[in-house]
Amino acid sequence: MADERPDPEGWRVTDHVCRYCLGRVLEGQREDGSIVARCADCGARGEGPHDSVCFCGAALPNGRHAGLACVPNENPTPERSAEVVVIYVGEDVRCRG
C-alpha cells in the first residue's frame, strides 16, 4: 500500500548519494514529524533518514552492513567531480551522519 502522507514542504540536500544511481539524497520532515528521503535524480524514496536510500544504509544479501559510506570528495578532478563519493570503510563502521 502506498504511503498517503504528503511530501514535506521543503527538502534539504544531504552529504549522501543514492545507492541506485549516485544522485544526491534529499531529506525532508513532514508535518507529523516523520522523515522521508528521496533521490534528487532517480526519485528513489525511503521512509526515514538518508540511509534509507543512500549507500551508508546498503546491506549485503545476508543482511550485514555493506561497509560503504558517503564522504565529501576531498580531491575533485574533471574525471571525478562529484561533491560526494562512496568509499569502503569496513563492515563494522556505520554511517557518520
Image (cartoon, rainbow, N blue to C red):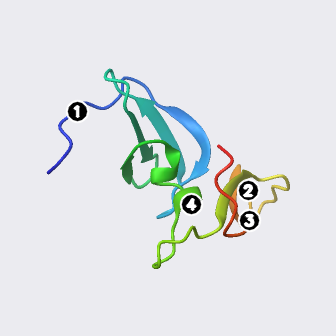
Q: Dot 4 corresponds to which residue?
A: 55
Q: Dot 3 corresponds to which residue?
A: 89
Q: Which amino acid does label 2 sit on?
A: Ser
Q: Regarding mark 1 in the picture, which secondary structure is present there?
A: loop
Q: Dot 1 corresponds to which residue?
A: 5
Q: Regarding mark 4 in the picture, which secondary structure is present there?
A: helix
Residue 78: x and y, percent? 78, 60
What residue sits 72% from the left and 69% below the top? 90
Q: Disc 1 to disc 3, how far (Cα)?
A: 35 Å
Instruction: Identify the mark nearer the N-term, 1 or 3.
Output: 1
Choose mark 2 or mark 1, whichever is in front: 1
Residue 68: x and y, percent? 65, 65
Q: Dot 2 corresponds to which residue?
A: 81
Q: Regarding mark 2 in the picture, which secondary structure is present there?
A: loop
Would you identify the image quadrant in which residue 64 lies?
bottom right
Vertical comparison of 27 with 19: above or below: above
